[in-house]
Image (cartoon, rainbow, N blue to C red):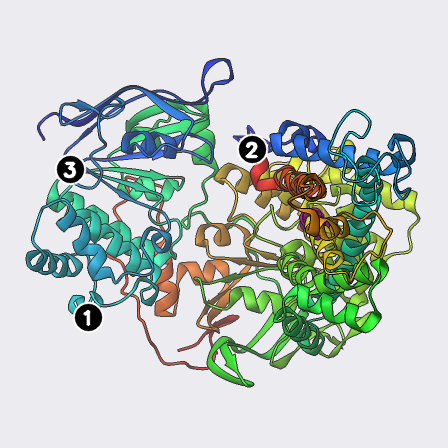
Amino acid sequence: MRILSDVPTRSAAHGFWLRLLRSPNGIVGLSIVLGLVVCAIFAETLAPHNPSKMGTGGRFLPPGRDFLLGTDEFGRDMLSRILHGSRITLLVGAVAVGISLTTGMLIGMVAAFQRGWVEAVLMRGTDVLFSFTETLIALSFVAVLGPSLQNAVIAVGVAGIPFYARTCYSAALVETSKPYFEASIAAGAGPSRLVFIHLLPNVLPTMIVVATLGVSTAILAAAGLSFLGLGAQPPTSEWGYMLAGSRDYINRAPWLMTIPGLAIAITILGFNLLGDGLRTSLDPVERR
Amino acid sequence: MSGALLSARGLAVTHGAGTRAVPLVHSVSFDLARGQILSIVGESGSGKSMTAKALMGLLPPNVTATGEAFFRGANLLDRGTSPPRGTGIGLIFQEPMTALTPVLTIGMQLTEAMIVHGLADPQEARTRAIQMLDRVGIPNPKQRMRQYPHELSGGMRQRVMIAIMMLLEPDILIADEPTTALDVTVQAQILDLLRDIVRDTDVGLILITHDMGVVAEMADDVMVMQAGRVLEAGSVHQIFSVPKDAYTRALLAAVPSVETVSMNAKPTDNHALLSAKHLSKSFSGGRAFGIAASETKAVDDVSLDILQGETLALVGESGSGKSTLGRILARLTKADRGSVTLGATNLLSLEGAPLRQERRKIQMIFQDPYASLDPRQSIGAAIEEPIKIQTTLSKAARQERVAQLLTRVGLTADMARRFPHEFSGGQRQRVAIARAIAAGPELIIADEPTSALDVSIQAQILELLSDLKSENGLTMLFISHDLAVVRQVSDRVAVMRQGTILELGPTEAVWGAPRHPYTKALIDAAPIPDPSRKRAARSPILDTFKVAPLSEAAPGHWVAL
């Protein structure tokens, strides 16, 4: 008999990058993030001055020819400080999200896979942490560990765990109830095969999107801690700390506050746009 | 009959515009008269639903319709014409749960449209709504007015949907797969109701369906569509007895009928391969502090033998527990009580590594070919998985076996590296079948393996399953709601309802002389794809009956009466 109307559904397998680059959000976000990475890697070369050297040309110089973004209250070059700050910002985002993502995914996947009392303990524990705001958890962590950039990053990472655990748990729950997962069980697959061959690859795309969006939250939270004096300590060039330090000079030298603020805003915008672009290009429904 | 009620000429539907325009429907023309039932039939992607949506002005954005469709002197496809939804043309959807608003009582939904269209004041609307509910066969209409959609069964909801549409006194009803989501006995009732309504009120009915049985039973005229084109149109007798187009002929040949005598039904006196004893499984809804709020018995003390080399069909409507029973046998759901012995081992008492080893012997094929393959795993890896887990073959030997299997199920060996989304539904089901037989199982449990597929693909898959079964000496448990398919493939059949087996016997014995009234009703309700046959009066369906243990009414034929 003729094969009737049984045509494969066409969809590009390798079109992920193409789709990302075609989405306006994705391309803008990717450019901003890539620009930031370049700044961070080549900060030494790009920065016109030593970011910690005081009194290079005078205090409170407005943006001009010699100092493109002006100087701060100690006469340090703002451009150099912002460039060096991008390193810390990216590192903070990556490490904090790394902590939240790996721990959260572990909790979420184990809970969804094991079910029973393991699930109950892990998810109720997550719910308890969820009932406190992330900032409060991060603050109490820093209070215990002591104020330093490293501790701030750990605190922000830990505070993010419940969110990632919840998201991963619900994504994993959907996958474990699908027939392909059961077919694998019926074939005799053991726990490690089920988790690493089937569960992880199917949960990962969702988590990558969540993590990309989460980078901005983490950067903001770490900057917030630094702003409160609980994160980066002087003379580190950290954007949140720079923002805090410039508070007293808001009338005299408004650029001191505007520039780090803008840097944070643009970075967050970049990661959010990238996350949105990833979401559309990884989501099979949006693809059609 | 006074001329055409609706007259479509050159109706075309296009997605997109300019150079990237994709035609979805090419130039469809037809006339619909009062009291006429026109059936548009076709497989998925044929454009049958798009045609109806174009008439209703319900096309998705970016999709445009051109041509003419004159109704009450206006062209429905003109941009300026406001579509006469409701009062002119009523639409009945496939899924009555989503078509009704869950947060409003059905009384409000019935009266709202009449009031909005200015057909009646609230008092009068209510009276007419109650009358209409009575007309569409809903018992206790006054009480029903206060109920919410979730309190009604699927069939009742579809009746309410029909009532809502009929209250607006439309001239045309468009029913888009109105019974596809319903059980066969309920389908029969809804079709009867629709036919009565057309006869009594003289509306024109456009019935969109993929089911040739429904067409044969309902339609006056038929339009066969494929890939957006009308291949053939004519009276129902003409289409069924002298189909002109090759596609129509192929489609009709692929349709299984409850009347077709099974080709492989031969009584086996083999020993039991698998033996299930006193299986029970309940699901509890809503649990608080360890106390179940409500309990549903999905499987209630079922005992069953599956004989070596046979195809045993498990037939039942939704909620009969047939899938749960299949899942218990495959050890995907844990039974509350009972035993399942395969050879000498009790499967239900195994855990861990011994269970994983034993799993090789029983493999499952699932209904939804889109969900039954891991989207992130190449199909080669999917088929290789059971071999890798269950045997000690080398990588080269495994890949050779995968290539063999792919060729055997009608695909090609070079497809192994592709991913599921590159395949059609039918091809994916072939991959799932290859995976199921890969590690040499003894029993295949196929849970509605063709329900999600078009009828012509279904025929191919059934043929493949039957060939593989005889080649490999497999035993099969075939779970289905489709009696025609069941008769075609099975040696023995077990009829399930509400968690118990009501009748069990050789397929031809059960079909030839069903002994349980429910089996009788089920067989009578199945539509027959032959318009020249006037159906016998349907057996009434009993809602409740006494539960009795199975007893042997004839050799090998067991009935619970």
Residue type indicated by callout 3: Asp
Residue at position x 27%, y 65% from top?
Answer: B540
For the residues carrying marks 2 and 3, which lies nearer the camera in this image?
3
Q: Which residues are magenta?
A: A201-215
**Circle 2 residue:** A6
Badge 1 is on which residue? Answer: B143
Give the Cα separation between the discs numbered 2 and 1.
47 Å
Percent from the top left, x then y, of residue A133? 63, 66
- Whether residue A260 sits left or right of residue B337 in the image: it is right
The residue located at (66%, 41%) in the rendering is: A254
Judged by depth in the image, the label closer to the viewer, 1 or 3, is 1
Which element is circle 2 on? loop
In this view, the residue in front, A64 or B229, is A64
Q: Quadrant of the C terminus of chain B?
A: bottom left
Front one among B465 and B31? B31
Residue drawn at the location 80% of the way across and 42% of the way down: A86
Tell me the amino acid under the disc marked 1. Answer: Gln
Residue B68 at what x, y percent from top left? 25, 19
Name the chain letter of the residue that bears numbered label 3.
B
Q: Is residue B309 above or below residue B415?
A: below
Dot 1 or dot 3: first in sequence order is 1
**Residue A204 lies in magenta, yes or no?**
yes
Q: Quadrant of the N terminus of chain B?
A: top left
